[in-house]
Image (tube, rainbow, N blue to C red):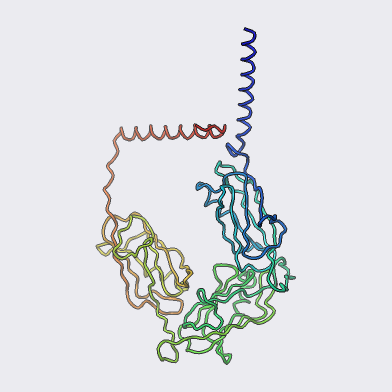
Amino acid sequence: MKKTSSVLSVLLALLMVLNVTAFAAGGEGGGENQLTLVSAKVGDADLSGSKIPAGSEITLTFSNNVTDESVLENNIGKIKVRTADDTEAQASVSPGADKTVFTVTLGSELAKGDYKLTVGKDFAAKNGSTLGTKQEISFSVKGEGSGEGSSSGEGGGENQLTLVSAKVGDADLSGSKIPAGSEITLTFSNNVTDESILANNIGKIKVTTADGTAADSSVSPGTDKTVFTITLGSELAKGDYKLTVGKDFAAKNGSTLGTKQEISFSVKGNGSGEGGGNNPLEVVSVKAGDSDLEGAELEASGKIVITFSRGMTDNQTANFGQIGIYDADGKKVEGVTFSDFTKNSDGNTYTELSYSELAGGSYTLKLGKNLKANNGKTLGEEKTYSFTVAGGEEPAEKTILDKIFDFVLSVIDYVRNLINKVLAFFNISI
């Protein structure tokens, strides 16, 4: 009897130890340790304090599963690369082969200078735990060649301001032949569109003819702080031109270009006319998902993407008024919304039209003839696109028994979820 009692005592003690261990393993993250950033590496070297080339891949390793579908989108948005003055720098974030890893690829044209990689405090693990505090790792990008000109301006911590690229679509502006009305994108190494310098910088960008006469063009800040967009006049004559950026063009940190930048290009005419470049506004595509809108059958709620050949931002509000969905009786559908006109990688401009809860039937999307591009050209004629919305039967009203059954199911789901959370807390799987 005494021996049996001793065995029971030992078993009881073991059970108590197991319970304490299971409780301790729970932690705030539920079933795993509190989430931590284990390492940030470039190859085998620590990222912190390192000097690495533009285009490098940084590997972030965490203590827990951070690439599960339930947290992936949130976590990608919490990883940023920024310059010393907190301007977001070009970088892409993707999940690694291991569930605890993210890969951050720096932009291939990042300027030489100081940067920091940040991971937000709400970066989360699959088990629900978060970092709790923002993680910040400083590093430098080393330039090619002599790499002269670190900033001594009041904003310090960045390179001497440089013009990174001048593009028309994906092509370099220098030496190119482009139509009148084209949009040129200038990308700089630093923040050049801050309010403190914006007016100065707009005045330092000019388009001139070969003999130095000012040519028709407009200058506007881009969506990124490092970008300006120049739109050539729609009636520019065929011939040689140059785009200049003055030596006093400045960054937010106080550094300037120091020397005038000059890029030569040509404008090609339409037909034989001396002042070619009519560049009429055209509809590039009208899509619902990956399919053309014309003749498509759509869901009751969704989006239609309308793409134009020219910039449309200057007349955005008026242009939205020229676009509408009409039912079979010719009545305009209410509640349609539009995203801001945005330039895509092909140099075209698009807007996303959102609609909701359309009844089954036939519809027409109309694009008005007065849709107007930044270069002043209009669509000229109304465009129409016919589509249908699949009809659906009205759901029958639920009986009292149906409602009671739905309530019972919701209670069962609630209890099931509660049990799962308790099991997860004690790291128990069944």
Question: Where 54 falls versus 369 (above or below)?
Answer: above
Judging depth in this view, the residue of 333 and 31 nearest the camera is: 31
Compared with 87, 184 (above or below) is below
For the point 56% across and 52% down, the residue is: 96
Between 361 and 78, which is closer to the camera in this rendering? 78
Question: Residue 254's x, y, as percent?
Answer: 70, 71
Please provide percent x and percent y for residue 235.
Answer: 45, 86
Rendering coords of residue 101 (x, y %): 59, 50
Residue 333 drawn at (x, y percent): 32, 61
Left or right: where does residue 138 sit relative to residue 95? right
Indicate the quadrant containing the N terminus: top left, top right, bottom left or bottom right: top right
Residue 58, image quadrant: bottom right
**Could you tell me how many numbered marks the image carries?**
0
Residue that extends furthest to the right in the rendered view of this protein? 152
Residue 219 lies, with reference to residue 24, above or below; the image says: below
Q: Is 323 placed above or below 232 here?
A: above
Which residue: 66% across, 63% down? 83
In-image side of 119 versus 329 (left or right): right
